[in-house]
Image (tube, helix red, strand yellow):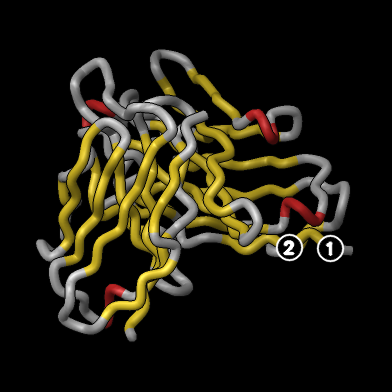
Amino acid sequence: DIVMTQTPLSSPVTLGQPASISCRSSQSLAHSDGNSYLSWLQQRPGQPPRLLIYKSSNRFSGVPDRFSGSGAGTDFTLKISRVEAEDVGVYYCMQATQFPWTFGQGTKVEIK
Amino acid sequence: QVQLLQSGPGLVKPSQTLLLTCAISGDSVSNNSTAWNWIRQSPSRGLEWLGRTYYRSKWYNDYAVSVKSRITINPDTSKNHFSLQLNSVTPEDTAVYYCARDPGRSAGGRGFDYWGQGTLVTVSS
């Protein structure tokens, strides 16, 4: 199975400032169709995970444009351009290139 | 809008069977491009995919190696839902269990785009 490793595990951020989370995969996520099937999920306290970004850089329906994703191969990044209070939670990367789909361990975003 | 609504008991005794159901609205369990999944989350294991069921002219299932000998996922087309059965549970199976939809590569390869609300299942006597 592909192992997903996130850094940092915790990210204290000032409101209105940017935040960045990295995700590295143990194998390339480049599919034979040319896409990297890397998703980012947000989990607010007491809630199920929510899809934010898919195929590395595509925002899911209803996701604010302050969230952006980038990367290919084995290295990926989620950026929040200006953190808002509602962004507090745990963020997970997930790969859907090679079955079974696997998740990173999560990065906790909290307000300083 | 797709919605997944989970139901089932929150407490199961050791050695017994865990049974959860996920009711689908806004899509069909028989959709031939979608897969219907069960995932669990615990502090020790994080998010762990358990298995899926999907229809491609006939029904298929895939299961995680870690639970393969104990798990069954069944679709019910008459009720448009799918279920998780996990046998011979131990305290290590204590977790929040989620159902989730994977719309497949034809929908952009999103992974899991809609999730159930989650069910905390505690295995204890």
The residue shown at (34%, 39%) is: B111
In the image, residue A16 sits, relative to residue A53, either above or below, namely below
Secondary structure under the numbered disc 2 in the rendered image: strand
The residue shown at (25%, 50%) is: A77
Residue A92 badge: none
* Residue A107: x %, y % from top left: 41, 62
The reply, left or right, for residue A49 in relation to residue B84 is left
Return the chain for callout 1.
B
* Residue B103: x %, y % from top left: 31, 35
Residue B122 badge: 2
The residue shown at (56%, 34%) is: B51
Residue B124 badge: 1
As rendered, which of A8 and A111 lies closer to the eye?
A8
Return the chain for callout 2.
B
* Residue A10: x %, y % from top left: 42, 68
The reply, left or right, for residue B23 in relation to residue A60 is right
Residue B56 appears in which quarter of the rendering? top left
Q: Are marks 1 and 2 in contact (CB under 8 Å)?
A: yes
In the image, residue B40 sits, relative to residue A71, either above or below, namely below
In the image, residue B62 sits, relative to residue A3, either above or below, namely above
As rendered, which of B7 and B10 lies closer to the eye?
B10
Spatial CA span between label 1 and label 2: 6 Å
Residue B55 appears in which quarter of the rendering? top left
* Residue B85: x %, y % from top left: 68, 41
- For badge 1, the amino acid type reads Ser
In the image, residue B108 sits, relative to residue B24, either above or below, namely above
